[in-house]
Image (cartoon, rainbow, N blue to C red):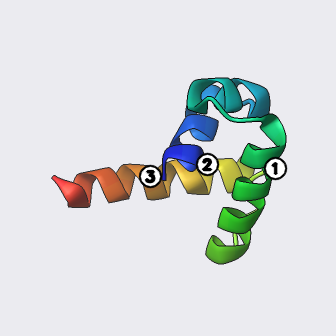
Amino acid sequence: MATLDAYCATDSLRRAADLLHLHHSSVSRRLDQIGKMLRIDLTTPTGLFRARVALTAWRLLDE
C-alpha cells in the first residue's frame, strides 16, 4: 500500500522511490505486481485515477 500511495501522491516513479528510500527499479517492479493483481494499468491516467479512488475507499473503510 505504501508503494501505491507514494506513486499516486507524486505521479513519479523516481519521486516515489525517493520517498520510500528504494531504488526506482524496485518501485517499478512493485507497481507492476500491484497493477497485475488489481488489473489496473498504472501507467495510464485512467489507471492512476482508479488507483487513487481505490486508495481513498480503503482509507475511508479503515477509519
Q: Secondary structure at mark 1?
A: loop
- The amino acid beneath tag 3 is Leu
Residue 31 in picture, x, y percent from top left: 71, 55
Q: Is residue 40 left or right of residue 56?
A: right
Q: Is residue 18 left or right of residue 60?
A: right
State how far apart marks 3 and 1 are (Cα). 16 Å
State how far apart marks 3 and 2 are (Cα). 10 Å
Res. 55 mark: 3
Q: Which residue is mark 2?
A: 49
- The amino acid beneath tag 1 is Thr
Q: Nearer the viewer, mark 2 or mark 1?
A: 1
Question: Is residue 14 placed above or below 26 in the rendered structure?
Answer: above
Q: Which residue is mark 1?
A: 43
Q: Residue at x 72, y 45 (%)?
A: 27
Q: Earlier in the sequence, mark 3 or mark 1?
A: 1
Q: Earlier in the sequence, mark 2 or mark 1?
A: 1
Q: Residue at x 44, y 52 (%)?
A: 55
Q: Residue at x 34, y 58 (%)?
A: 58
Disc 2 crowd, CA 10 A, few/some/many (<14, 14-19, 20+) = some
Residue 17 is drawn in which quadrant? top right
The answer to which of 45 and 17 lies nearer the viewer is 17
Q: Residue at x 25, y 53 (%)?
A: 60
- Circles 2 and 1 in contact, beta carbons < 8 Å: no
Question: Is residue 43 placed above or below 11 in the rendered structure?
Answer: below
The answer to which of 12 and 46 lies nearer the viewer is 12
